[in-house]
Image (cartoon, coloured by chain):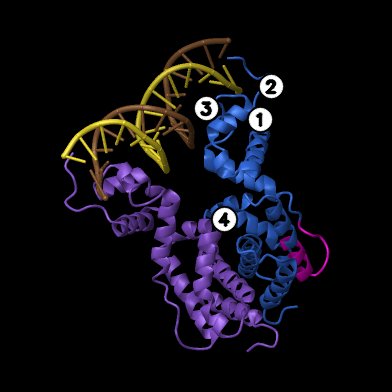
Chain colours: A purple, B blue, C brown, D yellow
DNA sequence: ACCTGAACACCGTTCAAGT
DNA sequence: ACCTGAACACCGTTCAAGT
């Protein structure tokens, strides 16, 4: 067989997998189909990636790296805007949700994502546990509103904002600001 | 091959699938493994069930049929208790969660579940859209607290109750009780 | 080091054929 | 009607062998 001009990079593998998933869902991205897209035989992919689980984790990380954490504002404002950005990403690529939900069942990935989003809360004086709690509540809310509600045809930005505000109010720690 | 004494029933198929999923996760319940467990060849299962998607839907419905809707109390009390029961089910069989999340992406199943849980809210004067919204918010919260929080080792009944109360307060419609 | 070819142990599903 | 046997078109992954 003719070989590729350049050797396979991990970036190339992850980006290609991500675009396949965004266009056709996780099930469209079999290791074999991915290899074909990359112009390579299936086993070659295993030189860059331990297994399919690792690949999906990398795709997820690559997506969420684009959800920037707002740098300014109160923690309430920063969390609200972060959730809006998460919502925007999930709306653009609803297919990422399956991946996100699956990852939440795997400790390491969930912990890593929660850690990043926790920053504004830690800055505001939340303890580590309270911050993880708040991030979990807010991201589950956002996921729910953006996907389940959409499936039920009750998706609505005003409703999302209303619930988001309520939820953030509820999270303010006793004696907090 | 020796045939089974009695013909295969749909109930038998669903119950066996459910127990396989509860013990080993969705991936432990391949159509072939299920058939073996039932003492039958794989194609025989397709006489009772259209495809694997339908089977998983039936397993889910069979599980949630056991989460009873509290008959008495204010809508707040009824919803809170319903969520506690959902939490109990998911804790006993965490493996059902994957199924539940997947179903939420399929309109029909999500709508059916939301409809059942909406009853106390409709009784209390919520409109259909508001009721679906509330059920979605609360069940996503419960799912998040019961699984994601558990994975992050911040699972705690007191916290669950605190957040649940806050969330239900936030859902009270303007001018509602 | 990087990749291929071939293979292993699986999938879900269909369909003609048997009882 | 109910089920089997055989097949189709796939999976993820491993591994010896080639360049």
Q: Which of marks 1 and 3 is nearer the N terminus?
A: 1
Give the distance between the C-alpha atoms of the residues marked 1 and 3, in whole angstroms: 14 Å
Query: Could you say which disc has been placed on residue B9 in the image?
Result: 1
Q: Tell me the crowding category of disc 4: few under 14, some 14 to 19, or many 20 or more residues within 10 angstroms, Cα based.
A: some
The chain holding disc 4 is B
Q: Which of marks 4 and 3 is nearer the N terminus?
A: 3
Q: What element carries label 1?
A: loop
Q: Tell me the crowding category of disc 3: few under 14, some 14 to 19, or many 20 or more residues within 10 angstroms, Cα based.
A: few
The chain holding disc 1 is B
Would you say residue B80 sits in the magenta stretch? yes
- Mark nearest the camera among 1 and 3 is 3
Q: Write down the residue under mark 2.
A: B6
Residue drawn at x 19%, y 53% is A6
Nearest to the observer: residue B69 or residue B148: B148
Q: Write down the residue under mark 4.
A: B101
Q: Would residue A58 appear left or right of B66 to someone viewing this image?
A: left
Q: Which stretch did the figure color magenta?
A: B69-83
């Amino acid at each position: 067989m003719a070989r590729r001009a350049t050797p396979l990079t991990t970036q190339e593998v992850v980006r290609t997998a991500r675009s396949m998933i965004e266009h056709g869902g996780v099930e469209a991205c079999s290791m074999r189909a991915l290899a074909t897209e990359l112009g390579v035989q299936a086993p070659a992919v295993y030189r860059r990636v331990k297994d399919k689980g690792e690949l999906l984790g990398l795709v997820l990380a690559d997506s969420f790296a684009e959800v920037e954490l707002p740098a300014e504002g109160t923690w309430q404002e920063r969390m609200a805007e972060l959730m809006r950005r998460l919502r925007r990403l999930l709306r653009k690529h609803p297919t990422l949700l399956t991946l996100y939900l699956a990852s939440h069942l795997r400790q390491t990935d969930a912990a890593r994502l929660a850690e990043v989003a926790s920053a504004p809360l830690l800055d505001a004086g939340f303890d580590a546990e309270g911050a993880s709690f708040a991030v979990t509540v807010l991201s589950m809310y956002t996921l729910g509103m953006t996907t389940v509600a959409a499936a039920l045809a009750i998706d609505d930005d005003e409703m999302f904002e209303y619930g988001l505000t309520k939820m953030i109010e509820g999270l303010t720690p006793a004696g907090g600001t």
